[in-house]
Image (spheres, rainbow, N blue to C red):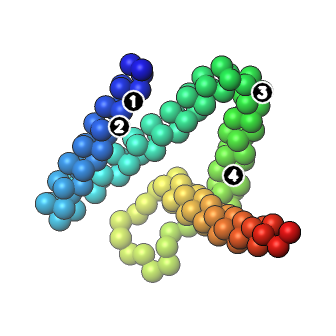
């Protein structure tokens, strides 16, 4: 019971901080370093979510079903392979017509990797929706 209260109040605190940062960003018209702060907060939230998913999945999975560790391990390996594939496909070249300050090759490669991941995951989501609808249509005919 105590753990549930801690999780509940932790989520409330994260929501309050998120809303406060969002209001602060709007009040600054997202100028200056407001965008950087919001992006860093986003990185923190994503990192916290992934960390929580892995740690809580490991704890609960080990307690309830030790074989679930294999499933979590396979998912983590799959994510690593997907990120590696996106990195291999990333060209790391500057955008066409870009005339701003020079950007390092590592930053360009990382940006292209994130774009590739977005394309791959977005395509997979669309494919999952289409395949799911087809499976439901076939299943409802039987």
Q: Which residue position is annotated with label 4?
A: 82
Above-or-below relation of 80 to 113:
above
- Specify few, some or many for label 1: CA neighbours under 10 Å numbering under 14, 14-19, or 20 or more: few
Q: Alpha carbon of mark 4 to alpha carbon of mark 2: how far?
A: 30 Å
Q: Alpha carbon of mark 4 to alpha carbon of mark 3: how far?
A: 23 Å
Q: Which residue position is annotated with label 3?
A: 67
**Secondary structure type for disc 4:** helix
The structure residue drawn at horizontal position 39% and vertical position 30%, both measured from the top left corner, is 7
Q: Alpha carbon of mark 3 to alpha carbon of mark 1: how far?
A: 26 Å
- Specify few, some or many for label 2: CA neighbours under 10 Å numbering under 14, 14-19, or 20 or more: few
Q: Alpha carbon of mark 2 to alpha carbon of mark 3: how far?
A: 30 Å
Report if the CB atoms under discs 4 and 3 are less than 8 Å apart.
Answer: no
Disc assigned to residue 7 = 1
Residue 68 picture location, percent across and down: 73, 30
Report if the CB atoms under discs 1 and 2 are less than 8 Å apart.
Answer: yes
Disc assigned to residue 11 = 2
* Residue 141 visible (yes or no): yes
């Amino acid at each position: 019971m105590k753990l549930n209260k801690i999780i509940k109040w932790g989520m409330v605190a994260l929501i309050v901080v998120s809303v406060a940062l969002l209001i602060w960003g709007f009040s600054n018209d997202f100028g200056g370093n407001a965008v950087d702060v919001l992006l860093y907060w986003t990185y923190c939230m994503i990192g916290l979510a992934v960390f929580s998913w892995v740690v809580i999945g490991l704890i609960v999975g080990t307690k309830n079903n030790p074989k679930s560790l294999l499933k979590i391990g396979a998912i983590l390996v799959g994510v690593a392979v997907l990120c590696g594939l996106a990195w291999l496909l990333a060209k790391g070249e500057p955008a066409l017509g870009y005339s701003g300050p020079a950007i390092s090759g590592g930053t360009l490669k990382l940006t292209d990797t994130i774009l590739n991941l977005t394309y791959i995951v977005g395509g997979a989501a669309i494919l999952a929706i289409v395949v799911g609808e087809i499976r439901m249509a076939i299943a409802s005919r039987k």
